[in-house]
Image (tube, helix red, strand yellow):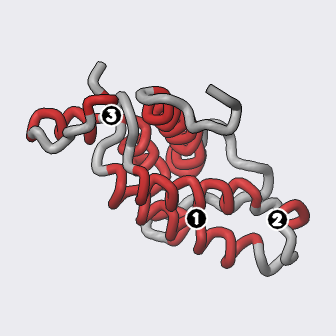
Amino acid sequence: MSIFDPAPAPWPSRMLGVFRIVAGAVFISFGTMKLFGYPPMPPGQPPLVLMSQVGIAGLLEFFGGIAITIGLFTRPVAFILAGEMAVAYFQFHHPQSFWPSSNMGTPAILYCFFFLYLVFAGAGAWSVDEAIARRRGALHDPALAR
């Protein structure tokens, strides 16, 4: 095997699962910051109104982050969250500067494309989606059998 060959199964699916779990858990913290004040919001932020754009973003980040972390309905949830992150970038970061390194929009861009990747790749290993697929007999890839 060379460094240019793809990793053998089941490692790509397992690492996708690890990445999904870690990124989802971190994403939850953006929702808890908005909804529960923990971790604390940056200084100077106005109080949260739940039925506002920021409040709805907090709900999406909290509940969507949980769904991504456990790998439940990954593709549709990731599609919605990718859209949320695109809106967040263009509405709040892009007007300050074109460059993400200057406008503090790097997390929004990276999450947007991570979620977009999940739309096409699925949840990977160690997910509720995978368990459902196995139960339904829809997962026929023997390389994923553990």
Q: Quadrant of the C terminus?
A: top left
Q: Quadrant of residue 33?
A: top right
Q: Position of residue 83 (x, y in %)?
A: 50, 70
Q: CA distance from mark 1 to mark 2?
A: 13 Å
Q: Position of residue 98 (x, y in %)?
A: 84, 77
| Mark 1 closeness class: few <14, some 14–19, many ≥20 residues within 10 Å | many
In the image, is 131 to the left or to the right of 90? left
Q: CA distance from mark 3 to mark 2?
A: 32 Å
Q: CA distance from mark 1 to mark 3?
A: 23 Å
Residue lying at the far right in this picture: please name it. Answer: 102
Q: Please state which of residues 86 and 75 is positioned toward the viewer in this rendering.
A: 75
Q: Amino acid at mark 3?
A: Ser
Q: Position of residue 72 (x, y in %)?
A: 30, 43
Q: Please state which of residues 15 and 86 is positioned toward the viewer in this rendering.
A: 15
| Mark 2 closeness class: few <14, some 14–19, many ≥20 residues within 10 Å | some
In the image, is 39 to the left or to the right of 131? right
Query: Which residue, given by chain and number where applicable, does mark 2 sit on?
Result: 100
Query: Which residue, given by chain and number where applicable, does mark 3 sit on?
Result: 127
Residue at 86% in and 70% down: 99
Q: Quadrant of the N terminus?
A: top right
Q: Amino acid at mark 1?
A: Met
Q: Is residue 59 visible?
A: no
